[in-house]
Image (tube, rainbow, N blue to C red):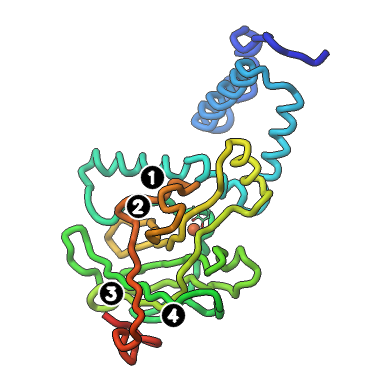
Amino acid sequence: NESTQNVRIFDTPEVQQFLRVIAGMDNTEGSDRAKAILHRILSDLFKTIDDFDITPDEYWRAIAVLNALGAGTQFGLLSPGLGFDHYLDMRMDAADEAAQRAGGTPRTIEGPLYVAGAPEVHGVGRMDDDPDPDGETMWLTGQVRDIQGAPLAGAQVEVWHANSKGGYSFFDPTQSDYNLRRTIITDAEGRYAVRSTIPSGYGVPPGCATDQVLKALGRHGERPAHIHYFVSAAGYQHLTTQINLAGDPYTYDDFAYATREELVVDGRRIEDVAEIGQRGLDGPFT
Ligand code: MBD
Ligand code: FE
């Protein structure tokens, strides 16, 4: 009989002492901060085992999920799904508010799919290296300004997004390296314009460890179509953000909790090639 129902040992002196030993509380090596945090987390988990009568079988099944989460970017994927990434943003927003650093484009989470070192574009260029027959051409235009509204020339805007199938280069083997990823340097007016392909939403790979955890919670793993940004300039605070394309079924039902009202952007469809002008297919329009 392996039932441990109604067994409650958490508050006994033996268990309390055991927790101190595990977390290294009484030795002089290591980091006091690491010890204090581990002691808290282990205490909460031991208590959870008592409170929910977690069986050995359930525990070992959880370990199998944790092992699967150790592969590739799986924990990086579950992390926003469990709200950690957005929670860190909420804390940084609160810190900004307390320090009266208000204004500007809101931050939102980075996600697990950024890759450093994307090719540079000065002011105007292209992001769509690979043909995407199902994709629709998109011009992504913008201007980097400081909080007072003054344009920032020479600012760095790193942009990355999915293709029409919701896949990202480096994670989707069908795409070439750095497809739909660029490092853009703003022009004299702080502006940029890059030609790309309208992204589709992202869904966590079916059956992956993250998917299993979300399924256990009765949740989906879908994100609306979105475009990631890192914006930086010497002497200014770094901005990590995204835009979400309006009209996606998941715009307000993002498994990663990254959508913010101010970041929902309505694309403007240009049907008339004359409106783009002769430069339109290769260069910017205004
Ligand atoms: C993504 O593309 C993403 O941006 C996040 C936050 C999570 C999973 C995939
Ligand atoms: Fe993304």
Circle nearer the N terminus (2, 3) = 2
The residue nearer to you, when weighing 145 against 201, is 201
What is the CA distance from the residue labelled 4 to the residue labelled 2? 25 Å
What is the CA distance from the residue labelled 1 to the residue labelled 4? 31 Å
Image quarter for residue 137?
bottom left
What is the CA distance from the residue labelled 2 to the residue labelled 1? 7 Å
Circle nearer the N terminus (3, 4) = 4
Q: Which mark is residue 210?
A: none
Q: Residues within 10 Å of mark 1 (few under 14, many from 20)?
A: some
In the rendered view, does 164 fall on the left or right side of 195? right
**Residue 47, placed above or below residue 100:** above
The residue tagged 4 is 126
* Mark 4–mark 2 CB contact (< 8 Å): no
Q: Residues within 10 Å of mark 3 (few under 14, many from 20)?
A: many
The residue nearer to you, when weighing 161 against 69, is 161
Residue 20 x/y as whole percent? 60, 19
The residue tagged 3 is 191
Q: Which mark is residue 89?
A: 1
